[in-house]
Image: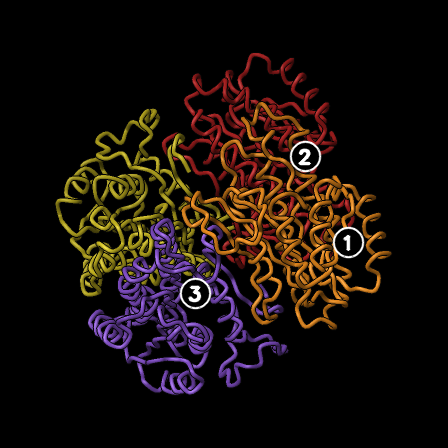
Chain colours: A red, B yellow, C orange, D purple
Amino acid sequence: MVSDKFFAIVAGVGPGTGRSVALRFSESYPVVLLARRPESYNDIVTQINSAGGRAIGITTDATDEASITSAFETIKKEFGKLQLIAAIYNVRPDSRPSLKPFLELNLQDLDTSLNGNVRGLFNFAQSVLPPLLKSVDSSPRAPTLIVTGATASIRGSKLWSVIAAGKSAGRVLTQSLAREFGPAGVHVAHAIIDGVIDVPDAEHAARNDATPDGKIAPYAIAESYWNLHTQHKSAFTHEIDLRPFNEHF
Amino acid sequence: MVSDKFFAIVAGVGPGTGRSVALRFSESYPVVLLARRPESYNDIVTQINSAGGRAIGITTDATDEASITSAFETIKKEFGKLQLIAAIYNVRPDSRPSLKPFLELNLQDLDTSLNGNVRGLFNFAQSVLPPLLKSVDSSPRAPTLIVTGATASIRGSKLWSVIAAGKSAGRVLTQSLAREFGPAGVHVAHAIIDGVIDVPDAEHAARNDATPDGKIAPYAIAESYWNLHTQHKSAFTHEIDLRPFNEHF
Amino acid sequence: MVSDKFFAIVAGVGPGTGRSVALRFSESYPVVLLARRPESYNDIVTQINSAGGRAIGITTDATDEASITSAFETIKKEFGKLQLIAAIYNVRPDSRPSLKPFLELNLQDLDTSLNGNVRGLFNFAQSVLPPLLKSVDSSPRAPTLIVTGATASIRGSKLWSVIAAGKSAGRVLTQSLAREFGPAGVHVAHAIIDGVIDVPDAEHAARNDATPDGKIAPYAIAESYWNLHTQHKSAFTHEIDLRPFNEHF
Amino acid sequence: MVSDKFFAIVAGVGPGTGRSVALRFSESYPVVLLARRPESYNDIVTQINSAGGRAIGITTDATDEASITSAFETIKKEFGKLQLIAAIYNVRPDSRPSLKPFLELNLQDLDTSLNGNVRGLFNFAQSVLPPLLKSVDSSPRAPTLIVTGATASIRGSKLWSVIAAGKSAGRVLTQSLAREFGPAGVHVAHAIIDGVIDVPDAEHAARNDATPDGKIAPYAIAESYWNLHTQHKSAFTHEIDLRPFNEHF
């Protein structure tokens, strides 16, 4: 049964990680799904509500302050009596167009990475941290902010220049937030996803299936996020890596 | 109900992490407890067996090849029909005597650290990896080797010279094993425990209690180890950090 | 005697590191000094030219593509017959205003950090890498791009959120450039300055003076940058840290 | 002209790095060369003395406390009026025999790595740090301890388990020494050599030759060590990486 006191919010819902995280957290909490396009969240909102959960989707561009502000006004109207207990930032700008030699890139490629990986996270964190702080005393679990990163968060590989710039900035921003808000009782964590995510995750039920080709099952990421959220406050993990068993690292 | 097919082994059982890890894994598996002195595991073996689980303790010095070999012969006799599914290396040589200025240390202080943190781990890993590999195909969960580390595993702080030498060696050895045995289906993980562990953990039941003084609850470490063990093979975590919400890092 | 074939360029010239780096490199090369305000480079340009060196200053905002483009047109006019052999990016946005609790920051604080630490570096690197590549075959020394970083480049400390975001992005961008352009013969290096820089460095001559209070002498940074520039191509250093002997780290 | 007040010591002299470091430092100081076999240092001692420098070789096994003690007694006799200003630990146990699957290794392979990379360094550091501390006040340059590391110092690659264990322990031990002895005025640095070293370096004179095949020129390492030694005390570098321009990293 889902909570009637707390809700969760997932920014960046597509066919992969965001969708599975929303499903996983919807087992315990009403969830708000943010995505730039309704088609990114419509099906999953329907699926959660049909299954007895509670979900709403809000078309939001996290990189736009006004859009984020408007989203949180909608949330207040819809979920006004609930408290925020978990917020996941999973916005990931498409990195493929900028995966090329540095001298073929332009400033717009850099800005795409910085907007999605850093500025959007900044806006989101500014919006969710005050309500997460308010939930500290009334929640048996530590209110949690989880940010999805990638290998590029810790490594500037050849050709990944602007993607790695954005990802590493998002990681270190998250680290600073962990140091500031951890002592206040909010668990801030960062996940380094190292590998290809297996999308679409049409079934989600197949939790114990092997993944012979070594792609990361999105529900496995979701399970680890849930485990981060439910950690005891005396043993917070700030950073995990997640990769297929056969991934080279 | 505990498994009648698989068992787990915990090396380094004392009043803190090792004990809680043994308890946690005993909920699902028969467990073998290794410690240098019987008084380190006697009570917990009794507790597990009384509660309907199955446990044996073996007096073992992991830093001594012959002692480790003898322990695994005993295991074969006692648990011969079971397969190894999880092995936790939690041996931690007492670091307090060597926490002093470098020029006041002697080679014995270094050897104490290297023996417990590296040589013992080497012996243990050599003993558990072959049976873990054998369990890959028959187990729904990935066979798992978890090694307990500390902040000194990644940082050579002032006065921590020989402790950090041993801890960092143990960490990097574990990392190499993850890269070698992950593709074969064995999950090798390392945990950086950053903070003071709250021992004795007399109750273990108090899972949701706050820890006002910021010491790490051993059962919280055990829970995170269990979560590592049950990760899907498409999303292994190699390294986690664990620290109290209010720990400076 | 300064080279009549190669020149160097320093972006971000103020009373500290940039000034000393310009002076050090002016011993061997004509130098171009870029700063947002003429008063930042006027004195040092005069000093270099009076001492028998050759220097020009160009008022430039590296974060503005058009301003950078215009600067390089001026350089072409003034130094057209010379080839670029060393480029140092030392632009450092003032971090003090944003050194505060995360919820007191606004998006403008983040942008100030991203503009100076990442977007300006991106523009600068796009402008200097093509001429540096052209110098590979004709130069006895490897053409060099050095980027000035800080402790925040590798650590998101409490209250340093947006500064660390920008610095870490600049570092990882630089790392990616090293991996792309090293094999082409361009030495790309990053320096982590860990400590307070002793400015003004009025004398510059006092190379062997002790620094009793533990502030970093800018000329010592300049000397290390020069040593990076003159490394043999079989032994490039990509990253150095620089801190006073008594700095806590 | 070599100093008549200070001397340097290099432990681990063979045909590569140790030899070039000894040559480089012999331009300024009398040097003591330590190696397990006289044939490792005889030629280079002769070469230095013939060229007007001053060198002695002492057959020493750094991993043996008694052997190190005996070496320093010989040094006292020979160089008793000189003060120690630089000590380089370049002992590198042969790693090739242990570069194999973990389950094919035995404890002796681990001990070979720990002995050379950690215990020898421990003994050496205990012997050189007291005289280096004594030189702090009387030397214009900071007394220096430099330790040679490798990529395995920061990464446990597949098959490199025991080598990486020893190397990482040596690195973190060095880091702890830097934090303890830096504030006392001794510069402790660690070098990560990432690549194949070009030995024999028969000429040593060919400082500006290109290295078309991408092997590290030992004299280039020596030059960087010299630059570390001569850093101003307000700007110590604790760690550098050194790799050929075309090395993948």
Badge 1: chain ID: C
Residue A45 appears in which quarter of the rendering?
top right
- Mark 1 or mark 2, which is nearer the start of the sequence? 2
Please say if the residues under marks 3 and 2 sit with CB atoms less than 8 Å apart: no
Residue C5 appears in which quarter of the rendering?
bottom right
Residue of label 1:
C127
Left or right placement of residue C122 versus residue A132 in this view: right
| Marks 1 and 3 share the same chain | no
Residue of label 2:
C112
Residue A229 on image: x %, y % = 47, 32
Q: Amino acid at mark 1?
A: Ser
Name the mark on residue D149.
3
Please tell me whether mark 3 or mark 2 is closer to you in this view. Answer: 2
- Tell me: residue D79, above or below residue D114: below
Kindly tell me whether residue C249 is visible in this rendering.
Answer: no
| Marks 2 and 1 share the same chain | yes
Residue D145 on image: x %, y % = 38, 62
Q: Amino acid at mark 2?
A: Thr
